[in-house]
Image (cartoon, rainbow, N blue to C red):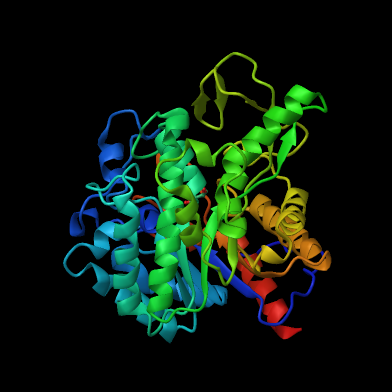
């Protein structure tokens, strides 16, 4: 595969900048019969939940094919690989052995393992509405750290608690499929508490390189009208600040703490345990206006009519095959905005996910997307944001949650009949870009 290179070389990133790719357990591993069930298995089994009617029982069969996938990582030349450790697999006999083998394989290939301890596949018997799940998560973190901590140095506690709360518990589009709307707020709090307790557990196990992968995107008001600005601000609180203020400022945005159960003040001390770095997953900005009093179909979701905001179509930008607008400059805006809001409380930032869904192996659109976003990231560096790494979502095509296999985010194509892996043009492009970074 010959990649038509983007004409200009990428700007030079500082020495030690960490280049990587990301995946998650449920989306690639398969071998579902070799572990305990998760909420995603139960959700997927409900008719109509997954758009193409597929399941993740086999997915990319990474569980059995991991040596081939590690060879792809080594061939790509990334410094690091972000994967997730499936909590139900860790609970199953022999489950941790798999991650032990994977970590050994990565270390032998010279790729740094960066595990995420929770990427949405909660053990079926657990529930984030229960506060006890936070303590259970800290135990899970301790078990994994004890087994892998001799080789794993960089840790991620949670992936996108915002999406897991919103999609899984408020809107019911993801597992466990609840539609609690604002009653889902305890799910956010319990995950944040779980994060803080896990940071303590990891520190007790000797870890000193701990982050989280929070999703963030700029919220753009539909107009300057007060109603639109206020609605956008509210949305920004729900999707962004609700998950970053407690971590970085030790408090909830105004009006939120009162809605939460338990002794929130003392929980916040745990939640705000200092982090070594802050992970940001960025995909797109969102345009938000005053409520329009009607249900909204947005990005495959049905948003109820009675929300205090309405999400609008962002016009004037190219879109991916998923319909997501491609707005690299919003990544610069986001990072500069985080720096402005949190100042010295913001630890060094790592982009833990960024990517796009396009069909085809000659994926020139993905090359253009990544090229644009890496340049936008560099502009944030030039503006003084301390960014230390960038991870592409995803190494390979995989089970894209409620979308099933219809969305292809990979640098590597997966044929779901034969499970054959084929590097796309974007893989070749990224390999050349990483070599050029290393040479200079
Ligand atoms: C993120 C998820 C990741 C993947 C990408 C496309 O929200 O963390 O698992 O689904 O979106």
Residue at image position (35%, 55%) is 134
Q: Position of residue 111 (x, y in %)?
A: 49, 79
Q: Position of residue 69 (x, y in %)?
A: 42, 69
Res 6 seen here: no
Determine which quarter of the picture holds residue 341.
bottom right
Q: Nearer the viewer, residue 177 or 329?
A: 177
Determine which quarter of the picture holds residue 296.
top right
Res 291 seen here: yes
Determine which quarter of the picture holds residue 33.
bottom left
Q: Quadrant of the N terminus?
A: bottom right
Q: Position of residue 133 (x, y in %)?
A: 31, 52
Q: How many marks?
A: 0
Q: Quadrant of the C terminus?
A: bottom right
| Relative side of 285 to 329, left or right | left
Q: Position of residue 75 (x, y in %)?
A: 52, 76
The correct choice, above or below, for 314 with respect to 364 in the image is above
Residue at image position (78%, 67%) is 381
């Amino acid at each position: 595969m010959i990649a038509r290179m983007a004409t200009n070389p990428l700007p030079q990133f500082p020495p030690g900048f960490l280049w990587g790719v990301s995946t998650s357990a449920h989306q690639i591993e398969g071998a579902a019969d070799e572990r305990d069930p998760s909420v995603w298995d139960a959700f997927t089994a409900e008719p109509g939940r997954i758009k193409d009617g597929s399941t993740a029982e086999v997915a990319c069969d990474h569980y059995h094919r991991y040596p081939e996938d590690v060879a792809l990582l080594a061939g790509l030349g990334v410094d690091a690989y972000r994967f997730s450790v499936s909590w139900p697999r860790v609970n199953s006999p022999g489950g941790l052995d798999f991650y032990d083998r994977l970590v050994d394989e990565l270390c032998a290939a010279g790729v740094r393992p960066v595990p995420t301890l929770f990427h949405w596949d909660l053990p079926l018997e657990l529930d984030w509405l229960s506060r006890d799940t936070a303590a259970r998560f800290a135990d899970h973190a301790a078990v994994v750290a004890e087994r892998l901590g001799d080789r794993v140095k960089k840790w991620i506690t949670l992936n996108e608690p915002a999406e897991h709360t919103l999609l899984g518990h408020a809107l019911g589009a993801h597992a466990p499929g609840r539609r609690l709307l604002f009653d889902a707020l305890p799910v956010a709090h319990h995950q944040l508490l779980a994060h803080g307790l896990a940071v303590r557990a990891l520190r007790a196990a000797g870890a000193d390189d701990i982050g989280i992968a929070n999703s963030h995107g700029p919220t753009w008001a539909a107009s300057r009208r007060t109603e639109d600005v206020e609605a956008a601000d509210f949305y920004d609180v729900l999707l962004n600040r609700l998950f970053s203020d407690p971590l970085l400022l030790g408090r909830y945005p105004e009006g939120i703490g009162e809605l939460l159960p338990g002794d929130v003040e003392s929980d916040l001390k745990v939640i705000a345990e200092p982090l070594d770095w802050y992970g940001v997953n960025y995909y797109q900005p969102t345009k938000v206006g005053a409520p329009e009093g009607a249900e909204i179909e947005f990005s495959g979701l049905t948003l109820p009519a009675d929300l205090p905001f309405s999400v609008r179509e962002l016009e004037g930008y190219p879109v991916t095959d998923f319909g997501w607008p491609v707005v690299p400059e919003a990544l610069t805006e986001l990072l500069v905005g985080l720096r402005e809001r949190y100042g010295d409380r913001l630890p060094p930032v790592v982009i833990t996910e960024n990517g796009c869904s396009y069909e085809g192996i000659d994926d020139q659109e993905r090359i253009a997307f990544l090229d644009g976003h890496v340049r936008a990231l560099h502009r944030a560096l030039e503006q003084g944001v301390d960014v230390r790494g960038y991870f592409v979502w995803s190494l390979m095509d995989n089970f894209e949650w409620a979308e099933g296999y219809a969305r292809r985010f990979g640098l590597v194509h997966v044929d779901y009949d034969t499970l054959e892996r084929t590097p796309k043009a974007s893989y070749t492009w990224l390999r050349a870009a990483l070599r050029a970074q290393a040479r200079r």
